[in-house]
Image (cartoon, helix red, strand yellow):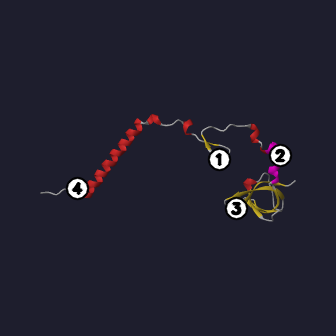
Amino acid sequence: MSTSKETFNKREKEKARQKKKLQKQEKKEDRKANLNKGKSLDQMLAYVDENGNLSSTPPIYKPSESKENGATNGQQHRVRNESSREGVLTRFDPVKGYGFIRDTQSRQSVFVHQNELIEPISENDRVIFEIKNTPKGASAVQVKKQV
């Protein structure tokens, strides 16, 4: 008598593979049968209201709400300028494209990159800038000479 070349483990793996293949085929057929039962895009959208709660209705735009506390665009621009700082460019390497500004208020040294310059500057120039927090620390943006 000859023995089977297939071991028990191989037969079990083949059965499991065939079972998995059959289940996959059944799922595929089920998806095809229930294809038209999905929700439309409008039914799947969710909106967030002013309180942070989810809602199914879109928010209503009111032009009066866009201006906080009656501030006009000029007033908002003035508020933005109050965040501007003054300083002196202590070091700047035009070859490498970066330098440092000494803030006159806090006396801190703030990094500046040449891509953030509005106009050309050189060492010891008095400048106006804004501070932006980056993953590597504070960085000066919108840097221009002080008039």
Name the amino acid, label 3. Answer: Gly
The local secondary structure at tag 4 comes to loop
Image coords of residue 54 (percent x, y): 61, 44
Would you name the residue on which mark 3 appears? 137
Position of 115 relative to 36 (above/below): below
Tell me if residue 103 is in the magenta stretch: no
Q: Earlier in the sequence, mark 2 or mark 3?
A: 2
Q: Earlier in the sequence, mark 4 or mark 2?
A: 4
Give the dominant element type of the magenta stretch: helix, strand or loop.
helix
Left or right: residue 17 compared with residue 105: left
Q: Which residues are magenta?
A: 69-82
Tag in front: 2 or 3: 2
Would you name the residue on which mark 1 appears? 52
Name the amino acid, label 2. Answer: Gln
The local secondary structure at tag 2 comes to helix
What is the CA distance from the residue labelled 2 to the residue labelled 3?
Answer: 30 Å
Q: Nearer the viewer, residue 44 or 83?
A: 44
Tag in front: 1 or 4: 1
Callout 3 environment at 10 Å: few (<14), some (14 to 19), or many (20+)? Answer: few
Q: Earlier in the sequence, mark 1 or mark 4?
A: 4
Name the amino acid, label 4. Answer: Glu
The local secondary structure at tag 1 comes to loop
Circle on res. 75 = 2
Tag in front: 1 or 3: 1
Answer with the quarter of the image where residue 47 lies.
Answer: top right
Image coords of residue 71 (percent x, y): 81, 44
Residue at figure coordinates x 46%, y 35% from the top left? 37
Callout 2 environment at 10 Å: few (<14), some (14 to 19), or many (20+)? Answer: few
Tag in front: 4 or 2: 2
